Amino acid sequence: MTETALGFLYDADPSKTEQWIGALADRITREERDEMAHDFRYSAHAGQIAPPGDWRVWLVMGGRGFGKTRAGAEWVRSIAESDGTVRIALVGASLGEARSVMVEGESGLVACSPPHCRPLFEPSLHRLRWPNGAQAFLYSAAEPESLRGPQHSHAWCDEIAKWPAAHERAMRCWDNLSLGLRLGGDQRIVATTTPRSTALVRRLVDGAESGDTAITGGATQDNAAHLPARFIAAMERDFGGTTLGRQELGGELLTETEGALWSRTLIESCRIELTGDLAGDLAGDLAGGLAGMATRIVIGVDPPASAHGDACGIVVAMLGSDGCATVLADASIERASPERWARAVATTARVWQADRVVVEANQGGEMVETVLRAADLALPVRRVHARQGKSARAEPVAALYEAGRVRHAGVFALLEDQLCGLMTGGTYEGPGRSPDRADALVWALTELMLRKHTSPRIHLLT
């Protein structure tokens, strides 16, 4: 379609748009109709449009489903289709994600391009080629040295908050990419991500003060027109009202609470994502996936004072053969009767094949043990008594996180909110009246990592 016709549509009175479109329908060709169907300007919301100005980095931070991937793909597509000389770097957390999300995903480069100018993907070369000669190359943030040497004119970096932090790989990857961005006359990078307080994200946000970074973004709800209502309802149910929900759904970059034993940055540095066979095992039968990794699996329980009060904290943790602990699940249950939450503990122990249940005896610990025995679980139950405040008990466990000896196998929204609310000095400034989930985690990790397990000694008589 001609620019005149497009301008006619964009500048029109919205109340007459349908009438004018109908009048134009007989004047445009089929190819022009296909072009209109792939014109992102018709469906994009404000946070998906590149801002004006002489920025070097455009940072798109939005909640889950905000449309960040589509925004990055459409920006790359506009650059590639307008200039056949560009060389674009496509950097994902891994090569697999770069291919499955940025290139071949539902909102990736192949899907959003019209048939007549769709890029050819050459998997063996990690390369896309457009009909006009423009090219894009795939890279993994886990291999920062792969970006040492290649030159590019533009780059799209996806989910930078997921880039590996170990050995400063994320920073090294970004620096190597930036040093090689020297082709053409207007080098630019778009970075799309769910906001997390990682060193690289904070660095780019700080760049907004100098004008180097332009930031757009928003909440999941901003893209509600293109998301299933059931998805939005489920996310609000699971994360609504939580601090982490502000990050994952609201698209906010959460700040740290001064004086807290845990920080968002610390927890993010401990997070791991299980993939392949092990991820499947964790969702179902664990025997195969964990047999060679776990030395012990323990469930920490913090019973509530009443059925109408706080939640019953139920947290599963594993001690690995490498001497590090992994938090596997938060199975806590809200507003349950003693019988119900005790049976929830028994079910969790059975599903996770736990070696021990550690339960605080101050609030109904004997009942948990009784119900477990009634369920015929040959499982040693250890009752513990809280002689210190929750924060005092938590401090040695927080030190284990600082030492890199604890990992989180996934995101545990409510649990992590509570951890970040435990303050040095004994106060609690997190959600809810009591950090029940955090306390259950502390009991589990104390049992796994801090309790001295003595072995019988043999004395030789001479």
Image: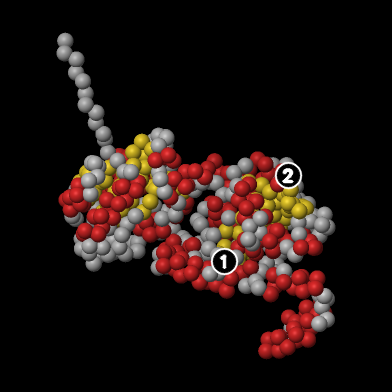
Residue at image position (48%, 62%) is 247
Q: Report whether residue 207 is seen.
A: no
Q: Which residue is the extreme one toward the top?
A: 462
Using the image, determine if residue 286 lies above or below residue 82: above
- According to the picture, the residue beneath numbered tag 1 turns out to be 66
Pick the front one: 3 or 418: 3
Label at residue 125: 2
Q: Position of residue 168 (x, y in %)?
A: 56, 44
Circle 2: residue type: Leu
Identified by mark 1, the residue type is Phe
In the image: residue 124, left or right of residue 375: right
Crowdedness of circle 1 by 10 Å Cα count: few (<14), some, many (20+)? many
Q: Quadrant of residue 46?
A: bottom right
Left/right of residue 370 with respect to residue 448 in the rendered view: left
Q: Residue at x 66, y 69 (%)?
A: 49
Instruction: Let me know if residue 148 appears in the view.
Output: yes
**What colouring style does the render use?**
secondary structure
